[in-house]
Image (cartoon, rainbow, N blue to C red):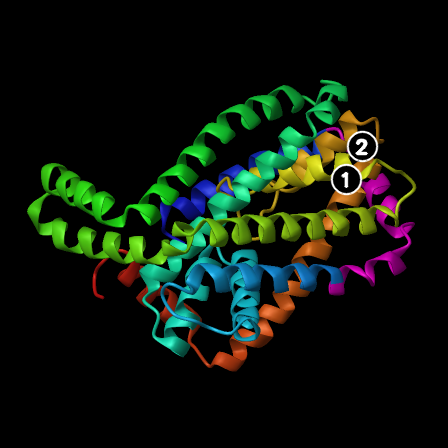
Amino acid sequence: MKRWYFWVGILVSVLFLFLALRGLQLDLVVSSVKSANLLWLLPVVPLYFTSVGFRSLRWNYLLRPVKKVPTREIFPVVAIGYMGNNIFPARAGELLRSIVLKHRYGIPISASLASIIVERIIDGVVMLGFIFFNLTELNRLTDASGFVGSIRSLALWGSLIFMGALLFFILAASLPRKVENLIRWLVRKTMPEKWQVKILDITMRFITGIQALSSIKSMFLVLGTSVVIWLLETSVYWVVMQAFPFSVNFFALMLMNGILNLSTTLPSAPGYIGTFDAPGIALLSAYGIEKSLAAGYTLLLHAALWLPVTLLGAFFFTREGLNWSKELEAARAEKEGKHS
């Protein structure tokens, strides 16, 4: 609670909630949810869990240079991670994933975190791809939402950041010795001596954790699996839309998925409160959907993406028999290099 990023996340969520709720008639939002055909939510659970299965397959590829773990055994760990992201601040679910892997298989936390960071970078690239693939949809929107111009800027700057990070990881995976020597030189030139050993230890384990990108075949497998993951999630958007009396095309939902998931990379309260909702409502409003209807859909979509995987992840984590707060603190200590 005392960590600065917790309070930054709360402030960001409050700001986005203000933007989401501004001008809304909450009784109309509640009415739109009550009148929705909730039977359409039944296919959401198997569809979303299928995407979790593909996430598990992708993580299997990324972890292979460190240790081979069967995909069926990775699935519960991925569910635990998404549960953690949904209920803990600062994406603590990523640490929970690493904790469970270390507990089960002895995989160093820094190595598994490296693979998770690669996942996030590739997700960002795919999300930007969804936006660029649907630029014609973006150009059709009105500026009435107040977000559209910002979204265009986000796509431009976000592409530079994510592409740059992806290129660095590919370089580090392809030329690990040269990158290692460069990092050693930079650390020795720029860091106090008392920190150097810890930083170099974490960095070397990090380079080990991204070795999956050294193979062109593995790179395409990871990227291809990522595209499937996000198309499946876009399908969840489409299924939930069937419960409401409005319709936009699948490409518009791809655009929405890309924008919402880039927005949720911002610091926020647990569960991406506000950072998911405000852009979703704004985007649908820019398509001419009545704002209370857009809000009802976005809130129900958020719940459909949040609740099933959170319950499943909590079930799997309970079976692990780990102490949540104690293990998180120990993992943070290892991540920061306090012990190996």
Numbered label attached to residue 313 = none
Describe the element under mark 1 as helix, strand or loop.
helix
**Residue 213 percent location from the top left of the image:** 42, 51
Asked if residue 43 is among those painted magenta in the image, a careful observer would answer yes
Residue sitting at x 80%, y 37%: 294
**Which residue in the structure is indicated by mark 2?**
291
Asked if residue 41 is among those painted magenta in the image, a careful observer would answer yes
Residue sitting at x 49%, y 64%: 60
**Which residue in the structure is indicated by mark 1?**
295
In contact (CB < 8 Å): disc 2 and disc 1: yes
Asked whether the viewer can see residue 84, the reply is: yes
In this rendered view, identify the residue nearer to me: 204 or 151: 204
Amino acid on which the number 2 mark rests in the picture: Lys
Crowd rating for badge 2 (residues with CA inside 10 Å; few <14, some 14–19, many 20+): many
Q: Quadrant of residue 25?
A: top right
Q: Is residue 286 left or right of residue 106?
A: right
Q: CA distance from mark 2 to mark 1?
A: 6 Å
Amino acid on which the number 1 mark rests in the picture: Ala
Q: Quadrant of residue 250?
A: top right
**Residue 19 percent location from the top left of the image:** 65, 31
Figure check: 136 above or below 121: above
Residue sitting at x 44%, y 49%: 118
**Residue 124 percent location from the top left of the image:** 53, 41
**Segment colored magenta:** 23-46
Q: Quadrant of residue 290?
A: top right
In this rendered view, identify the residue nearer to me: 83 or 220: 220
